[in-house]
Image: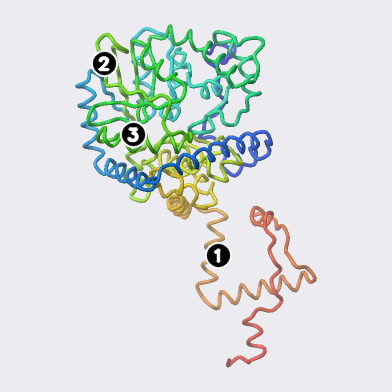
């Protein structure tokens, strides 16, 4: 029997993010998909337009951005203190706090907690952190089915797919594709879609609601993320648009929240700023349809066992970099994705990360390091147009950080011998001494004389082929300026 046949949940694409080729190669594949580009153009354009209208309604918008930046900077400067306060507040509220240094530790903690409840399935409210650590697959390997309940996440899961957007994971799918996925897959994992299912959004949402209802009602354990964690009161906050989060956070007996340590905020008063910034920046709404807050265990109301898993997974390494730590200010609004001309054309899958787009291009290489081809290439997945900074609600200087990360990648390359490093070394030799430079010029002039009548060199053989295949290199002159000067003015001149 195949591995896929014994799975409890739909299998995602094979391979891992880190094993993906570099961004440029992934982008070529995505650019060839005309339907994908059409879907992305329509979706990001709609969200951008809504955001512009909602932001224009707030005359103090720039002051709010500055406040959000200041709050996040203050929190990161004293994160150690606020994390201790957060733990104390959570424990005081009846929650159990677990610390995880990396994805393996976080997955082991969650799997252990679920197994202790003697259940074989959990329901989930959308969480980027659980996607980051690949929790669903860890649960699957332990014989536990993890059911996504966010509509877009459900589409991705049933489509044997990966998320391609921070806020709208199924942004690369249109409604006709969603209809086909629901008809094909829902019957394999629970309540089937109606046979007369149409591609009207209201009808698709109703089919998803019916499919998920049985899972909500029988679930004993839920897994959530958190948009914010308030140190002062031990309050966790989830904002969402459909109400699925409310179902996950109230019906099950046990709730496990997986939260990145950078989601911490000092006080409830600080939350006010972000509740104004986030909806307008993400979905172009004045306020979020569903905002859920919970303070641990309340006897007789909601989950009677609450666990909070605080994960590092590279975040303290990011925090240690003065030029890179601003990425931890991110509140996952996705405004930078919706404005980015690169993301709009290639989508999220080309980035090889749970965090695509401009913020992913700076955050992912810091969290994972730059040892893989995909992570080395991400800082170069940008035009440096600066639009991402202009829309960021917490003023993350993404263009500056992209340059910073490019410098780090270049510095690492210096210690490896390759074609690029050899070319740079030769250029350094040529430019270090006038005699060396003249020697190179004489060699170039010789090439100009050997190939008369041509205006451009055209493609050259390897190792110059990757560069010359996409560039028109002019023919070198048959006489350099230095040579002309000596011929016309004499050696003494």
Which of the pair 48/15 is nearer the observer?
A: 48
What's the distance in space between the residues labelled 1 and 3, CA to CA? Answer: 48 Å
Q: How is the image coloured?
A: rainbow
**Could you tell me residue 282's position as x and y percent?**
46, 35
With respect to residue 430, does 122 lie above or below?
above
**Disc sitting over residue 290 in the figure:** none
Which residue corresponds to the image point at 35% horizontal and 38% vertical from the top-left? 315
Number of marks in the rendered image: 3
**Which quadrant: the N terminus?**
top right
Q: Using the rendered view, name the quadrant where residue 243 is placed.
A: top left
What's the distance in space between the residues labelled 1 and 2, CA to CA? Answer: 67 Å
**Disc sitting over residue 263 in the figure:** 3
Q: Which residue is mark 2?
A: 297
With respect to residue 118, does 147 lie above or below?
below
Pointer 2 with pointer 3, Cβ within 8 A:
no
Q: Earlier in the sequence, mark 2 or mark 3?
A: 3
Question: Helix, strand, or loop for circle 2?
Answer: loop
Q: Which residue is mark 1?
A: 426
Which residue corresponds to the image point at 48% horizontal and 16% vertical from the top-left? 147
Mark 3 is surrounded, within 10 Å at the Cα level, by few (under 14), some (14 to 19) or many (20 or more) other residues, namely many
Q: Earlier in the sequence, mark 1 or mark 2?
A: 2
Mark 2 is surrounded, within 10 Å at the Cα level, by few (under 14), some (14 to 19) or many (20 or more) other residues, namely many
What's the distance in space between the residues labelled 2 and 3, CA to CA? Answer: 21 Å
Q: Nearer the viewer, mark 1 or mark 3?
A: 3
């Amino acid at each position: 029997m195949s591995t896929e046949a014994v799975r409890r949940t739909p299998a995602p694409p094979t391979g891992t993010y880190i094993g993906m080729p570099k961004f440029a190669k992934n982008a070529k594949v995505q650019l060839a998909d005309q339907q994908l580009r059409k879907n992305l153009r329509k979706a990001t354009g709609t969200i951008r337009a809504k955001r512009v209208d909602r932001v224009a309604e707030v005359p103090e918008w720039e002051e709010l951005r500055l406040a959000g930046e200041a709050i996040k900077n203050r929190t990161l400067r004293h994160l150690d203190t606020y994390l201790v306060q957060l733990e104390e507040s959570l424990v005081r509220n009846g929650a159990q706090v677990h610390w995880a240094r990396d994805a393996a530790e976080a997955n082991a903690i969650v799997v252990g907690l679920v197994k202790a409840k003697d259940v074989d399935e959990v329901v989930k409210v959308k969480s980027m952190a659980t996607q980051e650590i690949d929790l669903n697959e860890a649960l699957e390997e332990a014989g536990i089915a993890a059911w996504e309940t966010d509509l877009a996440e459900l589409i991705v899961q049933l489509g044997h797919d990966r998320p391609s957007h921070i806020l709208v994971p199924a942004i690369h799918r249109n409604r006709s594709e969603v209809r086909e996925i629901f008809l094909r897959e829902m019957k394999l994992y629970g309540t089937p879609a109606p046979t007369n299912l149409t591609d009207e959004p209201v009808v698709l949402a109703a089919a998803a609601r019916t499919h998920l209802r049985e899972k909500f009602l029988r679930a004993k354990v839920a897994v959530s993320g958190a948009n914010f964690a308030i140190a002062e009161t031990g309050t966790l906050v989830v904002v969402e648009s459909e109400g699925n989060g409310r179902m996950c956070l109230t019906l099950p007996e046990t709730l496990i929240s997986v939260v990145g340590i950078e989601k911490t905020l000092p006080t409830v008063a600080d939350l006010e700023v972000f509740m104004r910034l986030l909806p307008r920046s993400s979905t172009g709404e004045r306020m979020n349809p569903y905002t859920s807050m919970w303070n641990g265990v309340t006897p007789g109301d909601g989950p009677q066992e609450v666990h909070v898993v605080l994960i590092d997974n590279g975040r303290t390494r990011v925090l240690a970099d003065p030029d890179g730590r601003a990425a931890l200010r991110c509140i996952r609004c996705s405004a930078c994705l919706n404005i980015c001309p690169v993301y709009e054309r290639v989508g999220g899958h080309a980035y090889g990360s749970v965090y695509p787009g401009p913020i992913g291009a700076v955050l992912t290489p810091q969290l994972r390091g730059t040892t893989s081809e995909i992570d080395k290439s991400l800082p170069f997945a940008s035009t440096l147009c600066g639009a991402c900074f202009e829309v960021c609600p917490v003023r993350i200087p993404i263009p500056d950080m992209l340059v910073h990360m490019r410098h780090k990648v270049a510095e690492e390359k210096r210690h490896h011998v390759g074609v690029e490093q050899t070319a740079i070394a030769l250029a350094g030799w040529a430019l270090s001494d006038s005699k060396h430079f003249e020697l190179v010029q004489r060699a170039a002039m010789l090439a100009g004389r050997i190939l008369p009548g041509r205006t451009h060199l055209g493609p050259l053989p390897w190792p110059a082929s990757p560069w010359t295949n996409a560039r028109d290199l002019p023919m070198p002159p048959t006489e350099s300026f230095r040579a002309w000067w000596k011929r016309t003015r004499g050696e003494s001149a």
